[in-house]
Amino acid sequence: MIVGKVGYLGPKATFTHVAVQGVFKQHDDHIPYKTIPACIDAVDNGEIEYGIVPLENALEGSVNLTLDYLIHERRLPIVGEIVLPIRQHLMVHPSRAEQWKNIETIYSHPHAIAQCHKFLHGECTSTAVEEMTSTAFAAKYVSEHPELNIGAIANGLAAHEYGLHIACPNIHDYDHNTTRFVILHKDGAQEVPFLAGNGCKTTLMITLPSDQAGALHQVLSAFSWRKLNLSKIESRPMKTGLGNYFFIVDIEQKMDEVLIPGAMAELEALGCSVELLGSYPHTLLETEIPL
């Protein structure tokens, strides 16, 4: 099957890039974008066929920029999900491999910094920590400035891509750290080639009726009595005023002809607004570095 261009949150060697390589490894036309909105816009404008952006981290929670941009700006369907183990490493320029404990500043994405709090607090108490737009950009910066006494927190692919030395591997606080990435396409019925699914999900956006007591309980009951398992329910502001929220619900099965449509119809009868954001396969990658 011929696949068009695949875009992702860049630069090269971000965790999103790792996820792309894990699924689209038979296809090498991968295009990095500087921001999540830029990647989503590129799908909407037809510059790329698929866009891959982070949605949720097991430790830091949802990537609100992704959710809000998909809901409020570019309503693109989700056609696939990739779950990637996250392994954070401290890396330095090879010329500083023996003196890594003396580096003055560590750069990384704020989520990566938060995921390595115990290491930074215990091993790098006198080292400054600076935020950057991505772990890969931090690694790239260290690679391009060998004259500076600095390091980066990033993944193994970044060390490989930018020629850095991993001074301290696996410095993340928790071993079971994963990130969910969604695959976006303009056609919600489009199947993702090469995606060997470990199961299916259906994601709905639900807006509750205003001033109706017990509405959320009724919403949950519509799924419960049908034995539809919810893996996630999250509220996000509608951006129309205080107290106005919508809910994102993940159902642990593919859209069928009876149960999920029945639940949606029941919710609409209760006065809720219900929109399908995607019904798609999800896959768990076994390694962080598909080299």
Image (spheres, grey):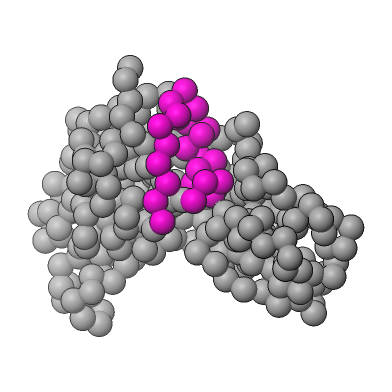
Provide the residue span drawn in magenta: 11-34
Q: Is residue 35 left or right of residue 76?
A: right
Q: Residue at x 23, y 74 (%)?
A: 239
Q: Position of residue 50 (x, y in %)?
A: 32, 38
Q: Is residue 18 magenta?
A: yes
Question: 148 or 124, which is in the foreground?
Answer: 148
Q: Is 190 a magenta residue? A: no
Image height of 213 relative to 94, above or below: below
Q: Going 56% across and 64% down the picture, which residue do you hit?
A: 109
120 vs 82: above or below? below
* Quadrant of res 27: top left
Q: Nearer the viewer, residue 227 or 42?
A: 42
Nearer to me, 106 or 228: 106
Question: Furthest residue to the right?
Answer: 98
Seen from this angle, which residue lies furthest top?
1
**Where in the figure is residue 148, as x and y percent of width and height?**
72, 68
Residue depicted at x 26% and y 52%: 41
Q: Is residue 11 above or below residue 25?
A: below
Residue 162 in view: yes
Residue at the outermost front position? 147
Q: Is residue 56 left or right of residue 139?
A: left
Q: Quadrant of residue 243?
A: bottom left
- 40 shown above or below 217: above
- At x 36%, y 63%, the residue is 65
Residue 99 in percent (x, y) is at 87, 63
Where, quadrant-wise, is the C terminus in this rendering? top right
Does any portion of residue 83 appear in the rendered image? no
Rendered location of residue 1, percent (x, y): 33, 17
Nearest to the observer: residue 183 or residue 218: 183
Number of numbered labels in the structure image: 0
